Image: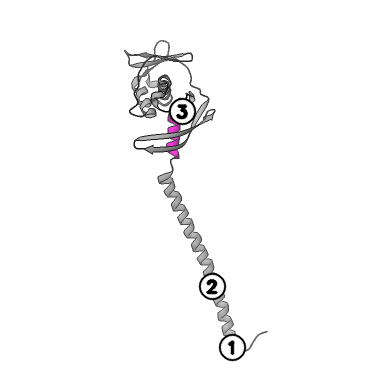
Amino acid sequence: MKTKDPQLAREKKKAAQRRRRKALGFVFSLLAIIGVAAIVTVCVNVIHARFFDDSKDKEAYARLIAPLVAMDPDSFPTLADANKDVLLESAVWAALSYEDNTKYSRNDKDEIILPTVDVERYYSQMYGPDAKIEHHTFTDVDIEFTYDSAQSAYIIPITGLSGAYTPVVESITKSGSTKVLVVSYMEGSSD
């Protein structure tokens, strides 16, 4: 029923306009809150990725220690307690895995002559700059790694490295200049 009172009609019209303005204000306020939340979320994700995400470091360390993990060494609390031949062999395999093997000379049996400087570099990267390396001839299963002091190199027979495990670095903790890795062994190759 329509009223003929102009005053009442104006009041109803103003009340309807206020309701529309309130609804529109509510919608804009809701959209503003959603926008601010989205911006904050993006900022937090960018800051986390830039300053706190260590997944690239974990991947780099996993790649570096893969030759050691592939050998499945006995556990050791400190380097002094570790099997020195296993540490040395893993550094040899790291050098062979990550360097361009075409740069190495070969003997008449087509064995690689691996300079100790490359082994020492990977040994230092894997076990720290204070880790002492003692070059010597050693054997693993049926492979002999011959140390030639005259050439300051290892003579590496033709063979392949295939291990039962690959590493997944779970966490990296830094204490001074030392980094401690928590590593899980995953069965099979990551390739």
Write down the quadrant of residue 10 in the picture: bottom right
- Does any portion of residue 37 appear in the rendered image? yes
Distance from label 2 to label 3 (Cα)? Answer: 64 Å
Q: Which mark is residue 125?
A: none
Image quarter hosting the N terminus: bottom right
Q: In which quadrant of the rendered view does residue 5 lie? A: bottom right
**Number of numbered tags placed on the structure image:** 3
Residue that label 3 marks: 66
Instruction: Decide: is 31 above or below 65.
Output: below
| Dot in front, 1 or 2 | 2
- Which of the 4 quarters of the picture holds residue 100? top left
Which secondary structure, mark 3? Answer: helix
* 3 is higher (above) or lower (below) than 115: below
Q: Earlier in the sequence, mark 1 or mark 2?
A: 1
Q: Name the residue that disc number 2 marks.
A: 22
- Which residue position holds label 1? 6
Q: Give the magenta-colored segment's residue range.
A: 53-66
The residue under label 1 is which amino acid type? Pro
Residue 135 location (% of width, % of height): 35, 17
Determine the residue positioned at 36% across, 29% down.
Answer: 128
